[in-house]
Image (tube, coloured by chain):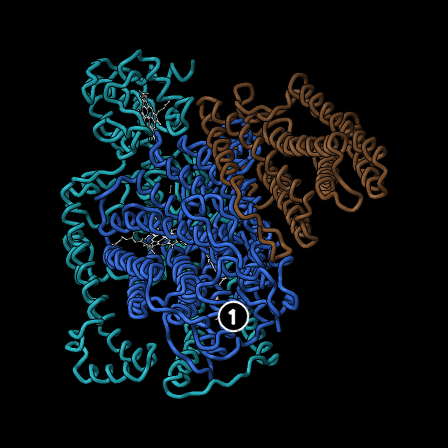
Chain colours: A blue, B cyan, C brown
Amino acid sequence: MAHGPKPGFTRWLYTTNHKDIGSMYLWFSFAMFLLGGCMALVIRAELFQPGLQIVQPEFFNQMTTMHGLIMVFGAVMPAFVGLANWMIPMMIGAPDMALPRMNNWSFWILPFAFAMLASTLFMEGGAPNFGWTFYAPLSTEYAPPSVTFFIFSIHIMGASSIMGAINIVATILNMRAPGMTLMKMPLFVWTWLITAYLLIAVMPVLAGVVTMMLMDIHFGTSFFSAAGGGDPVLFQHVFWFFGHPEVYIMILPAFGIVSAIIPTFARKPLFGYSSMVYATASIAFLSFIVWAHHMFTVGMPIAGELFFMYATMLIAVPTGVKVFNWVTTMFRGSMTFETPMLFAIAFVILFTIGGFSGLMLAIAPADFQYHDTYFVVAHFHYVLVPGAIFSITAGVYYWLPKWTGHMYNETMGKVHFWLAFIGLNVTFFPMHFVGLAGMPRRIPDYALQFADFNQIASVGAFLFGAAQLVFLFNVVRTVRGGGKATDEVWENPQGLEWTVPSPAPYHTFSTPPAVR
Amino acid sequence: MWNISGVNVGQTPVFRNSQRLLQGFAILLVTALRPKRTSICCVAGPLQCDRRKAARENNKYGDLQAMLMGLKRLFAFLFLSILTPMTFAQQAASEAVGDAVGEAERWGVNMTQGVTEVSRTTYDLHMLIFWICVVIGILVFGVMFYSMWRHRKSKGYQASQFHESTLVELAWTIVPTLILIGMAVPATKTLYDIYDTKEADLDIMITGYQWKWKYDYLGSDVSFFSNLSTPQAQIHNELPKSENYLLEVDEPLVVPVNKKVRFLITANDVIHAWWVPDLAVKKDAIPGFVNEAWTRIEEPGIYRGQCAELCGKDHGFMPVVVKAVPEDEYHSWLNERAAAAARIKELTNKTFTFDELYARGEKVYNSTCVACHQANGQGVPGAFPAIAGSKVATGPMDGHLSMVVNGSSKNPAMQAFGAQLSEVDIAAVITYQRSAFGNNMGDTVQPIDILNFKNK
Amino acid sequence: MATESSYYVPEQSRLPIFATIGLFLTAFGAANWINGGSAYIFFAGALSMATVLWFWFAAVIRENMAGLNSVQLKRSYVWGMGWFIFSEVMFFAAFFGALYYIRTFALPWLGGEGDRGSSNMLWEGFQNTWPLMVTPEQAVSGESAKVVGPKGIIDPWHLPLLNTFLLLASSVTVHIAHVFLKKNKRQAFNLWLGITVVLGAAFLYFQIEEYMEAYKHLGLTLESGIYGTTFFMLTGFHGAHVTLGTIMLLIMLLRSVIAHHFKPDDHFGFEAASWYWHFVDVVWVGLFIFVYVLGA
Ligand code: HEA
Ligand code: HEA
Ligand code: CUA
Ligand SMILES: [Cu+2]
C-alpha cells in the first residue's frame, strides 16, 4: 500500500497530502477563533457597563477591527477550506487535491499573513482601527501607519484564498472518480464548487480596493478624495462588491455540511437534491448584485436604492427553498439526535432567525433605522456564529471519527452543544433589543438605557467562550484515543467517505473507487 | 513598541466590574454544568431522574426522550441563565446608572415610533416585516419541531424514503415571492416619501467633524458647533453618570415644529452619519459630497441621537441633540444667536488681559481640543501629541498660531481651526495652552493678531 | 511515489514553504519600505521568490519530461491557469469599475448634476469635464490647491494607437508561433515567438516613452487628480502585466532555443504563457477604448 506520513515536523512543512493540509487548516482556524474570540471578550468586558473601564477608545476600535478581520479571514474561511481539503477528495473519489504543492503553499501563507496582521498591534500608533470594512478616508488619510502592513497582509491572504479556490475548482472538475457525475456529487462538494467561484471572482476585487488605498495613502492618487475628483463612496462600492459575496462564501459550505448531516440522522435521503443545487447557484448569482444594501444610507439615487432592495429581498427565496428542503428531509424521517445533528438543527433554526433579520435589513427605509446599530451586529452574528461556526462544529463532530478512527465523547459533545447554544443566544439575542432601542455599533461606551441588556450579553459571551474549551478538550481527547469508530461510524450514511476505513488511510483513493 | 498604552488596567471600577462579570459567569457555568450531575434532579424533580435513567438504558445515543427531559431542564436552566445575568445587570446597572434613567426607558426592546410621519411609517413597516417573519418562523419551526417530536427513531418511527416533489418546490418558491412583493410595495412608497426633499421651509447645513457637529442655518449668520457636554469624569467613572449620559451637548440644534426642514449633510474629515431615531433620519456625512434629508417634527421636545458611522477614536462620543420648539420661539432664538455672533465679532478688536484669555481658553480647550490632547494636556501617545511641554506650544508664537489656524500639514487630524473658531476663541485657547499644563510661557496673543495672521 | 495511481502526487515538497517565506518577505518588505524603512527585506524577498519559482517550474518541467504527468494532471494545470486568468480579469474589473463610477456618478455630482448635485456647493465653480483638467479643489482654491489637474493628456492617436497595433500584432504572431509548434516547425516557432517578444518589448518601450512625456511635459501624473489616478493605475497595471507576459514568453523562447523543450502535442507551458498574452491584449483593447479614446 501507499506510504504513511513522514515522521517529524517536516511532515507538516513539506506535506502535499490533502489530509495533513486539511488538519493544519483546521487547527490554524481554531487558533484564530480563540484569538478573535479573546478580542471579542475584551469588547464584551468593556461593554459590560457604561463608562470606560478596561480599555481606551482607540484600543477598543482596534479590538473591534481585529476581531472582525480575524474571525472572517482567519477562523471561518480557513476552517471551510480545511474541511474541503479533508473531504472533497474523499467524497469524489480522488487520490488527492489537483495541485498538491500549491495546496501546501496556500495554507502556509496564512500563518505568515496573520502574523503580519497581528504584529500591527505592537506598532507605533496601534493596529488598524477603522473596522473590518475599513471605509476610506478613515482608513487612508486618517489611518495609523500600520495600515500599510494591513494592506499587504490582505494581499497575501487573498493570494492564498485564490490559489485555494483554484485548487478546489480543478479538483472537483477534473478529479472525480469515473461515474461521479456532477449531479451525483454530495452537496458539500457542490456548495464548495460554487463558493470557489465566488472566491476567484471577488478576492481580486478586494486586492484591487486595498491597492487603491495604498496608492491614495502613499502615492498621491485621488480615488477616495473629492478634492481630486474621487469619491469616498467609491471605496464602499468596490469593497462591498467583494464583501457581500464574501458573506455567502462563509455560509454556502455550511449549507453543504448541514445537507450531509441531516439526511444521515433522519435516515432519509435529502429532499430536493437538484433544487438545492439550483438554489445554491441562484444565491451565488444574486450575491453579485446586492452589494449596495450595506450602503443604503450613503445617499444613493433612489433607483439604485430600489434595485438593491429588491435584489436583496429575492435572496430569501432560494435560501427559503434550502430551509424548507431541510425541514422536509426531517419530516417523516427516523431521527436521532447525536451531537452533529444537534448542531445542524440549531443551525437551521438560528440561521433562519438571522436570515429573517437580514430580510428586515434589506428593506431600505427600515434599514435607515437599523443601519450601524447593534441590530446589524445581532443579524450577522446569528448568521455567522450559529451559522458558519455551528456548521463547522457539526462537521467536525460528524467526520472526526472518520479522521481519527476514534469516537468522540458524546456526553461531552452534548454539554458543549447546550452550553454553546445557550451562551450564544444569551449573548446575541439581546443585541436585537439594544439595536432597535438605538445603540450604535462600534462604540466603547453607551448611554444608560442600554446597560441591562449589554450586561446580559457580556455574561453570555463568556459562557459561549467557555463552551469552546469543552470542544477543544473533546477533540484533543478523540485525536489521542478513545472508543474505536466503525468504518461507517453512523447508521448507513451516504457517501464515498464512509466506504473507506476509519481512520481514513493516508492516501485514500489511489485507485478510483467504483461509483454507482 | 508594545502598545499597551491603550489598555488601562488598574482603575478601581475595573476590579469591581470584572469581579461582577466573573460572578455572573461563574453562576452561569455552574448552572450549565449541573444538568449533567444528579443534583439537577433536585431542580427538575426526582421523577425525571428515573425516566432519564430508563431512557439512557434503552438508547445508546442520546435520543429524543432524553433530549426532551433535557428540554425541561433546559427551561429551568434558561430561566436561571437569563435570570442570573438579569439580576446582576439590575444590580450593577442600578449602581452605575443610579436613579438617572427611569425604569420605563430601561429594557427597551423595540424601535421608537418617533415624532414624525416618516418615523411612524417606518415603524409600521418594521412591525409588518417583523410579524411576517414571526408567522413564517412559527410555521417552519412548527413543522420541524413536530417531526422532531413524532418522527424519531426512539419511538420506533420508520423513515419514509420520499425525496422529491417539483410541485412543492414550486409552491415554496412562488409563495415567498408573493410575500416579498407584499413587503416591497409599502417599502417602496415609504422610500419615495423619504427621498422627497423638495419644497423645504428651512435649510440647515450639517457638517461632521472629528468629533462634533457643526450646524449652519443657511440664509442667516447663525452657525455653531455642537460638542458632547458629558464631563470626562463621568466617562471615567469618577462621578455618577447624569441622566442623559453621552447624549447631551453644549449647543443643540434648534428647529421649529411643523415645518419641513431640509438637512444638507456633509463632513469635513472622515465619514460620519447624522442620526436621530425619533425623526427616522439617518444619513451619511461624506467629506466632499452633500447628502440631503428632511424632517417635519410634530411635537416640541428634545430628541437625541448619535453619530452612526465609525469615525475614529471618539465615534461613540459625538451625540446629536435636536430641540424642536414652536415657530415664534424658534425665531427669537435665531435672532438672539445672530446678535450673539455679531457681539463676538466686535470682540475681535478688544484687547484682553491674560486672565480673561486664560479663563476663556480653558473653556475652549475643554470643549474643542480635549478629545485629542486630553484634559491633562498629555495627548495620546502615538496618535495625538502632548501639549504639555510641546515644542510648538512652548516655541515661537507664529508656529503655534499656524498650527492652530491652518492645521497640521503632516496629519489631517489636527484640523485648521481658523475656520472653526472665532478669533477670540483662538487667541484664548493659544494663550491658555502656552501657560497651562506647566508650559508657563505667560505670554498672550490678542484676537486682532489672529485676524492679522489669517489675512497675511 | 504514488505509482499505484496514474495521477502524480509528489511525496513531499520543500518548495511551498520556501515560496511562503519569499512571499512573506516580499510583502512585509514592501510595507516596511513604503513606510520609510529599508528596502533590503523587500529585495531579499523578491529574489528568494524568483529563485523558488525557478526551482518550482524546473521541478514541474522535470516531472513532465520524466513522463509523470498524466493527461488528467495536465488538465489540472489547464484549469488552474484558466481560472487564474479569470481572477486577473476581476482584478482589472475593479479598476475599470472605478473609472466607470467616477465618470458616471461622482464627477457629475460634484459638478452639480443629479441626486447629489448639492455637492457642488462645496466646490463652487467646479465643472464636470472629462478629461478632468481642473480638480474640484483647484476650482475652489486655485493656485494654492494641492491636487492640480493635468495640463494636457495623451493623444490616443499617436503612441497608444501604435501600441495597439503592436499588441494586436503580437497576439497574431504568438498564435502563428503556436501553429508552427503544433506542426513541429521548430525554427519557425522560435522565429515567431521571438518576434512576439520583441513586439512586447517595443510596446513597453513606447509606454515608458509615453509616461515620460506625461510626467515631463503634460503635468499628467499619479497625483494630478482622478484623471491621472485612473489613467496611470489602469495603464500601469496593464504595463506590469505586459512586462510579466513578456518575461514569460521570453523564458518560453529560451526554453525552446536552449533546452529544446516543447513537443508538438505537449507544450502547456508555452500555451499558458500565450493565453496570458492574449488576455493582456484584450485588456489593452479595453484600455484603448475606455481610457484613451473615450477619455480624450
Ligand atoms: C454568513 C453571513 C451572512 C449571511 C448568510 C447573510 C444573509 C443575509 N443578509 Fe447579511 N450581513 C452579514 C452576513 C451575512 N448576511 C454581515 C457580516 C453583515 C454586516 C457587515 C458589516 O457591516 O460589518 C451583514 C449585513 C447585512 C445588511 C446591511 C445592514 C446594514 O449595515 O445596515 C443587509 C441589508 O440588506 C443584510 C441582508 C441580508 C439578507 C437579506 C440575507 C439573506 O441571505 C437571508 C436569507 C434567509 C432567510 C430570509 C431565512 C430563510 C428563509 C425562509 C424561511 C423563506 C421564507 C422567508 C421569507 C419570504 C421572509 N445583511
Ligand atoms: C465569523 C465571524 C465572527 C464570529 C465567530 C464572532 C464571534 C463573536 N463576536 Fe463578533 N464580529 C464579527 C464576526 C464574528 N464575531 C464581525 C465581522 C464584526 C464586525 C467588526 C466591525 O465592526 O468592524 C463583529 C463585531 C462584534 C461586536 C461588535 C463590536 C462593535 O461594534 O464595537 C461584538 C460585541 O459584542 C462581537 C462579539 C462577539 C462574540 C462575543 C463572539 C463569540 O462568539 C466569540 C466566542 C469565542 C471565544 C470567547 C474564544 C474561545 C474561548 C477561549 C479562548 C477560552 C477562554 C474564555 C473563557 C474561559 C470565557 N463581535
Ligand atoms: Cu462621527 Cu462616528
Ligand atoms: Cu450583504
Q: Residues within 10 Å of mark 1 (few under 14, many from 20)?
A: some
- The x, y position of residue A477, in whole percent, is 31, 60
Q: In the displayed structure, does residue C67 sit left or right of residue A113?
A: right
Q: Quadrant of residue A173?
A: bottom right
What residue is at 19 percent from the left and 54 percent from the top?
B21
Give the residue type at disc 1.
Thr
Is residue B84 something that shows in the picture? Answer: yes
Q: Nearer the viewer, residue C63 or C124?
A: C63
Of B321 and A67, which appears nearest the observer?
Answer: A67
Q: Quadrant of the C terminus of chain A?
A: bottom right
Q: Is residue A390 above or below residue C124?
A: below
Q: Residue furthest top?
A: B396
The residue depicted at 14 percent of the width and 53 percent of the height is B95
Q: Of A80 and B27, which appears nearest the observer?
A: A80
- Circle 1 is placed at which residue position? A499
**Residue A63 position in % (x across, y down):** 33, 44
Which of the 4 image quadrants contains residue A466?
A: bottom left
Q: Is residue B60 left or right of residue C205?
A: left
Q: Nearer the viewer, residue A224 or B239?
A: A224
